[in-house]
Amino acid sequence: MKSILFSLNSLAAVLLIFAYISPYVDPSITGFFSIFGLFYPIILFVNILFIFLWLIIKAEKALLSFLLIAIGYAPLIKYFGFNSETENCSGISVISYNIGKTRIDFSRKDADKYIEQFRKFLKTENPDIICLQEKTKWHLDIYNDLFSEYNVYPNNELGTSICSKYPIVNGGNIPFESIAHNASWADVNIGSDTMRFYSIHLSSNRITRTTEKMLDNPDLSNTAIWGDLKFIFSRYNKHAQLRSLQLDTLLMHASKSPHPVVISGDFNDVPQSYIYNQICARYNDAFTERGFELAKTFISVVPGLR
């Protein structure tokens, strides 16, 4: 029994190593490791369970997972912020918001309720800069009203936009493979300084429903679940490769900016991914700098999706 448990523990340890490797391997070269980065929190949790199990059965066996977690602790701070909450910070406030769901909310019979909720959110947060993703053609008049106090670039267009209380002096688009996935940029005058803001929307995985269905009934004896797993792995790898190519285009553009750069948006990926790692290697990550507690920016069972 102990030998079987240790074999399973060893397998979990190998998967954790693969998850550690994931951020350093371009999925456009091989997508093998990227899926382990996606499920890093789950793999980590399984290894923690083995530690507690071995502490009860045979303590020295707990060293395998314990040492691996201790050596590879760095990814933890990408998922869980350990910074203290600060108040009255000087500077500008920036919000990134994928408003794709408003296509549904603003089409309901009680749409006025959702519009008012959104308006209250904007009033409460009072951001200086808003980077929008997934603007749709259905409600441009509502968006124009909601963001009437802001300079908007590009205005009355679909996809991504930057809204600013400060003057926008220049701007442009970086097209990707579809109108739904693109990047916009705007140079904003803030006092005597100019900053370039990017609002980006990288390729969507489109695996949420399948993942939720699978986790609702995680019966490995059910042959259908293996088909779901294959679908998830295939779709995630495909779109991870697309995001890698999109990111290359974005980073090349940003590297030529004459001004300090702020990149925000819907990355459709997790912190333990190649995409996230490449951006953080060049720019400061707002979450690791100021984040507090566990955070994700997408309502999904996929842990840490941002």
Image (spheres, grey):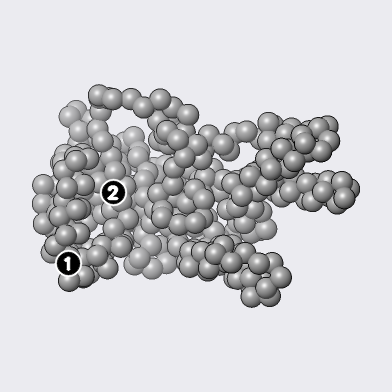
Horizontal arrangement in the rendering, residue 61 relative to residue 75 (left or right)? right
Mark 1 → mark 2, Cα distance in angstroms: 26 Å
Q: Please tell me which of labels 1 and 2 falls first in the chain.
A: 1
**Residue at x-position 16% and y-position 51%:** 119
> On residue 238, which mark appears?
none
**Residue at x-position 45% and y-position 57%:** 300
Mark 1 belongs to which amino acid? Asp
Disc 1 target residue: 110
Disc 2 target residue: 131
Callout 2 crowding tier (Cα within 10 Å): few <14, some 14–19, many ≥20 = many
Instruction: Look at the picture and state if 127 lies above or below 250.
Output: above
> For residue 263, what is the image quadrant?
top left
Horizontal arrangement in the rendering, residue 132 relative to residue 284 (left or right)? left
**Residue at x-position 24% and y-position 32%:** 92
Camera-side mark, 1 or 2 = 1
Measuring from the top left, give residue 24's x and y in whole percent.
62, 45
Q: Is label 1 in a helix, a strand or a loop?
A: loop
Measuring from the top left, give residue 122's x and y in whole percent.
19, 46
Mark 2 belongs to which amino acid? Cys
Q: Is label 2 in a helix, a strand or a loop?
A: strand
Query: Can residue 64 be seen by looking at this rendering?
Result: no
Say whether marks 1 and 2 touch (CB < 8 Å): no
